[in-house]
């Protein structure tokens, strides 16, 4: 991941390539006048893009890294969204319970996590489902976006190489098996509602509570 610093704004080049296609998926699931929580917002580029694309909603960003939260705030200010978008939450999925106020909890209608579960230990995916189930109800959704390995389906060479490079950085990282994620979802009362093939061998996976 290449970061270019402009004031506190970071630029994650992949966000420019995937934000439109992710927004197209989101547009089918988000309801107006609702609040959506983004886990692992990174630079904040997705957050400000989705906030501008869907002006009737509130996009709540979060990230455990201070440098990322500074970037998110910088992007919010740069885009003139400070009166609309809340500040990012300092949210590490494994630090539980999550720092979500009662008021925020009552507003959340969906949780979105883009490109995180392969770049942290499996325990993070586990924690994400375990905490999300307390924040959502049956009409809401949890959306994961990123690369996955699927049983009986050839994994692209680019994803195999990516998986290897992740494991070299940290043996606990790596592209997750969709079936294992689905199993975890099921253990936490979620069912896989939809899987959408995305460009560059990524998937959007939508989960809802049973
Ligand atoms: C590859 S970046 C993706 C950022 C952004 N979602 C995007 O698509 O550009 C992975 C992000 O996961 C975050 N992250 C890593 N471990 C985390 C954890 N335990 N809880 C929440 N976020 C985490 C990192 O801080 C980083 O922002």
Image (cartoon, rainbow, N blue to C red):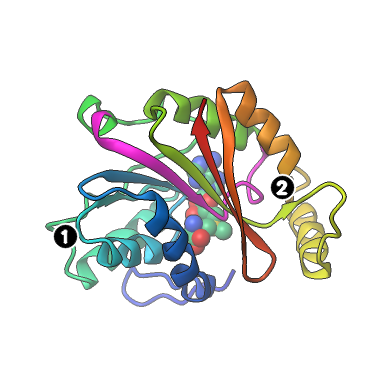
Name the residue: 47% across, 59% down: 25
Q: Earlier in the sequence, mark 1 or mark 2?
A: 1
Residue 185 lies in what quarter of the image? top right
Name the residue: 59% across, 69% down: 1
Name the residue: 21% across, 61% down: 55
Give the side of residue 43 with respect to residue 190, left or right: left
> Would residue 194 be seen by someone viewing this image from the given angle?
yes
**Residue 20 drawn above or below residue 87:** below
Give the side of residue 2 with respect to residue 131, left or right: right
Q: Where residue 33 sits in the image (x, y, percent)?
A: 20, 47
The one of 94 and 19 positioned closer to us in this rendering: 19
Question: Magenta residues, as a range?
Answer: 106-122
Give the side of residue 7 with respect to residue 209, left or right: left
Q: Residues within 10 Å of mark 1 (few under 14, many from 20)?
A: some
Residue ID for mark 1 = 82
> Would residue 96 be seen by someone viewing this image from the given angle?
no
Query: Total of numbered circles in the picture?
Result: 2
Q: Where residue 82 sits in the image (x, y, percent)?
A: 16, 60
**Residue 4 drawn above or below residue 85:** below
36 part of magenta stretch: no
Q: Secondary structure at mark 2?
A: loop
Which mark, residue 173? 2
Which mark, residue 93? none
**Residue 59 drawn above or below residue 92:** below
The one of 35 and 100 positioned closer to us in this rendering: 35
Q: Where residue 42 sits in the image (x, y, percent)?
A: 45, 58
Name the residue: 80% across, 56% down: 168
Q: Residues within 10 Å of mark 2 (few under 14, many from 20)?
A: many
The one of 161 and 31 positioned closer to us in this rendering: 31
Q: Where residue 157 sits in the image (x, y, percent)?
A: 84, 68
Residue furthest left as drawn: 83
């Amino acid at each position: 991941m290449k970061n270019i610093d402009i004031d506190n704004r970071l630029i994650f080049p992949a966000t420019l390539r995937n934000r439109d296609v992710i927004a197209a998926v989101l547009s089918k699931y988000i309801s107006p006048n609702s609040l959506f929580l983004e886990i692992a917002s990174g630079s904040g580029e997705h957050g400000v893009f989705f906030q501008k694309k869907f002006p009737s909603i509130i996009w709540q960003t979060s990230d455990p890294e201070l440098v990322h939260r500074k970037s998110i705030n910088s992007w919010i200010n740069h885009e003139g969204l400070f009166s609309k978008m809340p500040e990012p939450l300092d949210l590490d999925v494994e630090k539980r319970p999550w720092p979500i106020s009662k008021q925020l909890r009552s507003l959340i209608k969906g949780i979105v996590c883009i490109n995180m579960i392969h770049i942290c230990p499996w325990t993070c995916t586990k924690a994400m489902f375990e905490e999300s189930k307390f924040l959502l109800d049956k009409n809401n959704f949890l959306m994961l976006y990123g690369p996955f390995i699927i049983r009986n389906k050839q994994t692209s060479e680019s994803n195999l190489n990516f998986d290897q490079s992740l494991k070299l950085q940290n043996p606990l990282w790596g592209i997750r098996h969709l079936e294992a994620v689905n199993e975890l979802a099921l253990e936490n009362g979620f069912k896989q509602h939809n899987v959408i093939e995305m460009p560059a061998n990524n998937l959007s996976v939508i989960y809802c509570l049973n």
